[in-house]
């Protein structure tokens, strides 16, 4: 069995001619069920370690927040060099 996760970025609806959203990206991850626990534990350790052992309440990893010039959301004010290390 495999787990699939797909997510999109750059589109907020059916208006395909919106000049403010010229790019649409669809990304995904495919994991074997046998590898899920190992992958999840490793990813959780990396992200929890970044935040000093405690994830912010309601944390979700969003690339736009992580990679914005000054950081946004849970990454607001974090130095870009440190955020790039997480990437």
Image: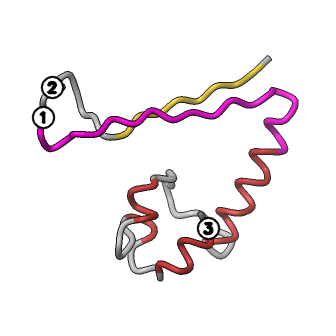
State left or right for residue 17 relative to residue 81.
Answer: left
Q: Are marks 2 and 1 in contact (CB under 8 Å)?
A: yes
Q: Quadrant of residue 31?
A: top right
Mark 2–mark 1 distance (CA, rounded to whole Å): 6 Å
Mark 1–mark 3 distance (CA, rounded to whole Å): 33 Å
Question: Residue 19, percent across and down?
Answer: 12, 40
Dot 3 crowding, Cα within 10 Å, few <14, some 14–19, many 20+: few
Examine the rendered structure and indicate whether residue 62 appears above or below residue 24: below
Q: Quadrant of residue 63?
A: bottom left
Residue for point 53% across, 80% down = 81
The label number, if any, that marks residue 41 in the structure image? none
Q: Are marks 1 and 3 in contact (CB under 8 Å)?
A: no
Looking at the image, tell me whether mark 2 or mark 3 is earlier in sequence order: 2
Give the structural element (helix, strand or loop) at label 3: helix
Q: Quadrant of residue 49?
A: bottom right
Looking at the image, tell me whether mark 1 or mark 3 is earlier in sequence order: 1
Examine the rendered structure and indicate whether residue 63 appears above or below residue 7: below
Question: Residue 15, percent across and down?
Answer: 15, 25
Question: In this figure, which residue is indicated by the disc labeled 2?
Answer: 15
Foreground label between 1 and 3: 1
Residue for point 36% across, 66% down = 68
Question: In this figure, which residue is indicated by the disc labeled 3?
Answer: 86
């Amino acid at each position: 069995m495999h787990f699939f996760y797909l997510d999109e970025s750059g589109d907020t609806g059916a208006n395909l001619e919106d000049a403010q959203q010229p790019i649409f990206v669809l990304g995904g991850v495919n994991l074997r069920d046998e590898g899920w626990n190992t992958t999840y534990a490793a990813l959780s350790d990396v992200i929890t370690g970044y935040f000093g052992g405690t994830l912010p309440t309601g944390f979700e990893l969003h690339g736009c927040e992580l990679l914005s010039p000054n950081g946004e959301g849970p990454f607001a004010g974090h130095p870009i060099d440190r955020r790039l290390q997480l990437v």
